[in-house]
Amino acid sequence: MDKDVPRAHHDLGGAAKFMCEPVDTEPHALTDFDKEVDAIRQILGMKGVMTVDELRRGIESIPEAEYHRLSYYRRWIRSITDNLLRKGVITEAELRSTLEAG
Amino acid sequence: MFAPGQRVRVKDDWPETRGPCHIRTPHYLRGLHGTILRPLGSFPNPEDLAFARPAPRRDLYHVRFAQPPVWQEGRAGDELVVEVFEHWLEAA
């Protein structure tokens, strides 16, 4: 068994770090941002632009420090953005000008 | 195809060491023995879907593992059930 290969940072099952504190299982309200990101993901799926598996692969590619810093839906929007840039659906210039326009 | 009750071993394979990949088999199961509980149907392979490649359908199974050898904790009789795709399993 080659358990010497370190687990990837997103592969958290059974990691001791997360076995020491109780998991918060209380339902919590979604923010408007969370809902908007979810809506974007659903539209991209329905239009055949991006699968949920591509979303997951993109989330797993986020560097470890950033991965743990970002909230759940911020990981999503980071992955969605990376996917859309890679597929050429949006360009970096378009993204930058839209963000600057607020 | 595997049958309920059949003993299997999760492949001791680490594709993440060979380049970009998306796999659904957790690190803690690789190389471990389990028992087929039930077939769950066949689904397009997420390892291909993740890269927008053509994705042949693969059979998915619920596989039962004794918990203590997986996480070195729990009591005898504690079990873990995980969804594992056929191409990650070999007869044991």
Image: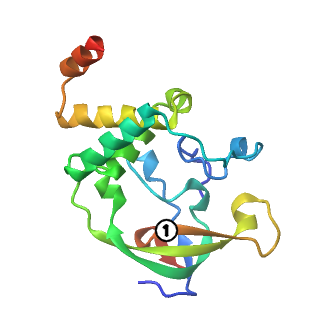
- Residue depicted at 38% across the width and 48% down the height: B21
Chain under disc 1: B
User: Is residue B2 rendered to the left or right of residue B5?
Assistant: left
For the residue marked with disc 1, what is the amino acid? Val
Q: Which is nearer the eye, A21 or B35?
A: A21
Residue hosting label 1: B84
- Residue depicted at 77% across the width and 59% down the height: B72
User: Is residue B89 rendered to the left or right of residue B76?
Assistant: left
- Residue depicted at 37% across the width and 37% down the height: A37
Label 1, secondary structure: give it. Answer: strand
**Image coords of residue A24 (percent x, y):** 69, 45
Quadrant that contains the N terminus of chain B: bottom left
Q: Is residue A49 above or below residue A94?
A: below
**Dividing the picture into quarters, in which one does residue A16 lie?**
top right
Quadrant that contains the C terminus of chain B: bottom right
**Image coords of residue B32 (percent x, y):** 61, 67
Extreme residue in the top direction:
A100
Would you say residue A72 is visible in this rendering? yes
- Residue depicted at 43% across the width and 52% down the height: B15
**Dividing the picture into quarters, in which one does residue A89 lie?**
top left
User: Is residue B68 rendered to the left or right of residue A95?
Assistant: right
Q: Which is nearer the eye, B13 or A7?
A: A7
Crowd rating for badge 1 (residues with CA inside 10 Å; few <14, some 14–19, many 20+): many
**Image coords of residue A59 (percent x, y):** 42, 40
